[in-house]
Amino acid sequence: MNTFREINVSVASATAQADALRAAMVDEMRERGDIRTDELAAAFHAVPRHVFAPGEPLEAAYRSDDVVITKRDGHGIAISSVSAPPIQAMMLDQAELRRGIRVLEIGSGGLQRGADRGVGRRGG
């Protein structure tokens, strides 16, 4: 049986691993030119992508060039996914979000909305 302390250490370790993987993903995307602004980088740093990919290993959630399948039908066919980070970055960049713009995000389960809010901080 795990003690409360052991569980806290485990959670802290997983959080640190997720933070490190997220930072590496953002660095890689910046190097490739997928992320071109500090605001977009900050948004990707702020949103815990793994929370929107339940049951997936942290490494899968933070791959910088792949979708994460989040739901399959009874035949194993993918019916829901989290878009690849470069696609999300491109959509956010093209949206030209700035403070005061209202966004209706449908179908993202919240991940894109979290990033929208981070990028929307730029501007006046």
Image (tube, helix red, strand yellow):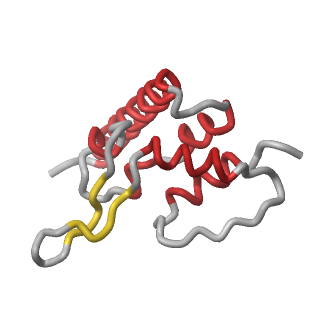
Q: Pick out the residue farthest to the top.
A: 31
Q: Residue at x 29, y 46 (%)?
A: 7
Q: Position of residue 89 (x, y in %)?
A: 54, 44
Answer with the quarter of the image where residue 36 lies.
top right
Q: Residue at x 49, y 21 (%)?
A: 31
Q: Pick out the residue farthest to the bottom.
A: 74
Q: Eyeballing the image, is 41 above or below 4?
A: above
Q: Name the residue nearer the viewer: 31 or 99.
A: 31
Q: Residue at x 29, y 62 (%)?
A: 70
Answer with the quarter of the image where residue 93 lies.
top right
Q: Residue at x 28, y 38 (%)?
A: 59
Answer with the quarter of the image where residue 81 lies.
bottom left
Q: Pick out the residue farthest to the front.
A: 94
Q: Is residue 97 left or right of residue 42?
A: right
Q: Position of residue 94 (x, y in %)?
A: 64, 48
Q: Pick out the residue farthest to the right.
A: 124
Q: Eyeballing the image, is 72 above or below 31?
A: below
